[in-house]
Amino acid sequence: MTPQTSFDAGTEFDRQVRNLTDLGYPDLAGLDPERFTALLAPLRDLALGAAPTPYDPEGGRVPFLLVVSREVVPIEQTMPLTTLRGKDKSGFVDRSFEPGALERFVAIPSTALPDRRAYLLFDVERGEEFCDVVPNDAMDVIAERGRTLLTIEEGVALVTHFPQLLVKNKCFSLGGSRSSDRRVPAIWISRNTPKLGWCWAGNPHTWLGMASAGGRGGAM
């Protein structure tokens, strides 16, 4: 299938807002739907002005992604709202994250988050070219390209808005969120549903690449 190189950015932005609303994000954030929508609305113009990049979710690439951070809705509540395409089984956080561990996996300084609540991520790639590559090496290559690593929240958003993007042998690590140890968060398929887990920074996996993006943008 040939990637769709152009699409209606406004329609896609509205779809992502509606997707979050339908999934119950406003209630989880303690906001009514109108206030939740108002929080995201200033980002629409950024989406409309985004540089054109391929729209090819099945191929692992999308032009932009609407991200709601853990400061609005905790990861422990957003991950169970993810599913695989055509499935209704809830995603989950692996128990290998000991109690309190997720709070320690924070955005690395180089991600330069534009807003602590909600923002856009641009030119997102699943990163399957890095399958079977040592995560540390993959992160170095991505940095050399001038791209940015995805955080946990951004990985959750990617699967939330584009469940078709998470497929067998094409899952991805999220090097933009790190703790003080060698663990690198990742999302892959387990028990026929998305799982948020981690792998060691020095251990490659044949089915696990490294997701990246061209940049981020927040409302003025």
Image (spheres, helix red, strand yellow):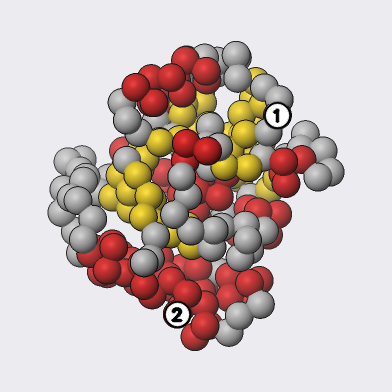
Q: Quadrant of the N terminus?
A: top left
In which quadrant of the rendered view does residue 142 lie? Answer: top left
Residue at disc 1, secondary structure: loop
Placement of the C terminus among the 4 image quadrants: bottom left
Disc 1 target residue: 180
Res. 191 in view? no
In the picture, measured across the screen, residue 71 lies left or right of residue 104, that is left
- In the displayed orientation, state which residue is furthest to the right: 99
Q: How many marks?
A: 2
Q: Nearer the viewer, mark 2 or mark 1?
A: 1
Q: Residues within 10 Å of mark 2 (few under 14, many from 20)?
A: few
Q: Residue at x 67, y 22 (%)?
A: 182
Badge 1 crowding class, 10 Å Cα cut-off, few under 14, some 14 to 19, many 20 or more, is: few
| Mark found first going from the N terminus, 2 or 1 | 2
Query: Residue 28 location, x and y as percent?
Result: 66, 71
Mark 2 sits on what residue?
38
Task: Give percent across and percent down for residue 219.
Answer: 38, 66
Position of residue 90 measured from the top left corner of the image (x, y, whole percent): 64, 54
| Residue appearing at x 36%, y 55% in the figure | 217
